[in-house]
Amino acid sequence: MKSWKDDDMTDSSDESNHDMVDSSDEYEWEDDGIFEDDVKTVAFKPEWNEESEIPADYIRREYMEIKDMAKKYVVPFLLAKSLMKFRAVSKEWNHWIVSPLLSYQQSTSFYKLSGYFYQTVDVDFQSNPDFLSLDRSANGVPSPSLGFLPERVKVLSSSSGLLLCQGRENYYVCNPVTKVWKLIPCHQYYHGFDPSVVLAFDPRDNIESYYHIVAAVPLLGQPVVFFEIYSSQSNSWKRSSSECLELEGTILIGGGFYMKGMGYWNTTSNEVLAFDVKNEISAVLHVPIPPGRYGALTQIEDELCYVTAYNDGGDVFVLDIYGGMYMSLKNSVSINIGHKKSRRAFEEIPFIENSTVSCSVLPCFNNADDIVVIYTNERIYLYHLREQKVEALRTPRQLNPQRRFIPYINSLVMLHELNN
């Protein structure tokens, strides 16, 4: 499989005597400005100080130049889009940015939500995915439609910078920033055209970048859900011994949400299916929401929450936040979005028929900020819970219950090389 480093990594041959690296052919982002000085890192030889018994390079850290400090302590916390621009600073920076070490450091240091891949779910793959950036100057991917994949796909799940996509017959795992992708071997059981799958990937303590794919598969004609699990370490699928018998009369919604070792799926009722990926244990979380109201899974204060929203008149919206072991109502927040003509526009195309709900809550990772994302016909609103402020973004067309939004974190994470 072709690596993203093949076209850009340089060596010390006679053909690579240029100080600058041109990466414009592969990355089509607009350049917002980069460092102009050629960066040359000074390596200190580790020595031992007999008086203090502290390594000499630690003592002399104060003598490091600013550029070296930035490279070591700032760069791993930057967004992938910014780092790809910095590859043009010099050969040295290019080598550093495409190195596996920096990819690992950045993927374990940067957690902030970058935006959403969104797409209308259809059987015939007529809709290409697109990307909605929360900050267009800082977040982005070079190919929002994922045109680098060998076929048209549906985006199903996201985890720490990796995407899980479905083609006509195959699954793909890819990094949309580096355009590196892997074809997943065929699974044994039928998952359907809109499978309930979760991509489970945690870069911490996982320098090999191993990941899992968990598919919740309903047993035809019976109220039983079993789980088929793919492991990138073994490059194979297996059926888990765990089964769920508690979802009678409800349907799993495609896609999934992964957080802290657990996979979660929404259902058409007020229940959430949970699966412990490591221990292969399933459970059902019952959310006590009113009938006919729907919400989304969101990470708030480092725990799983289920958030609903509805219009309470005019510009006022109410957020109900459920969480804890029993998914009880933890908080109810009334916010004013400050858009005077919004209510009439919302009522023209309600999100749920015969209901006062005229907006949708989008799933959200909140490793850096506690925010709730509200999607209306006119705009997308980010409500910051701690600061109690509202931030408005553009809406990609009107509300559509068939359009799915997958939260995404910008990352340089490398894909694990699959075993044959």
Image (spheres, helix red, strand yellow):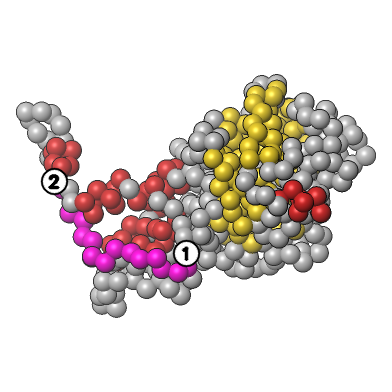
Structural distance between the alpha carbons of marks 1 and 2: 35 Å
User: At 33% across and 64% down in the image, what residue appears?
Assistant: 34
Provide the residue designation for mark 1: 4
**Observer-nearest of 20 and 308:** 308
Residue 252 visible from this viewpoint: no
Tag 2's secondary structure? helix
Q: Nearer the viewer, mark 1 or mark 2?
A: 2
Residue 209, visible in the rendered structure: yes
What stretch of residues is rendered in magenta?
A: 29-46
Q: Is residue 31 magenta?
A: yes
Q: Is disc 2 surrounded by few (<14), some (14 to 19) or many (20+) residues within 10 Å?
A: few
Amino acid at pointer 2: Tyr
Query: Which quarter of the image is occupied by the N terminus?
Result: bottom right
230 displayed left or right of 10: right
What residue is pinned by disc 2?
Answer: 63
Q: Position of residue 22 (x, y in %)?
A: 37, 73
Residue at 33% in and 57% down: 96
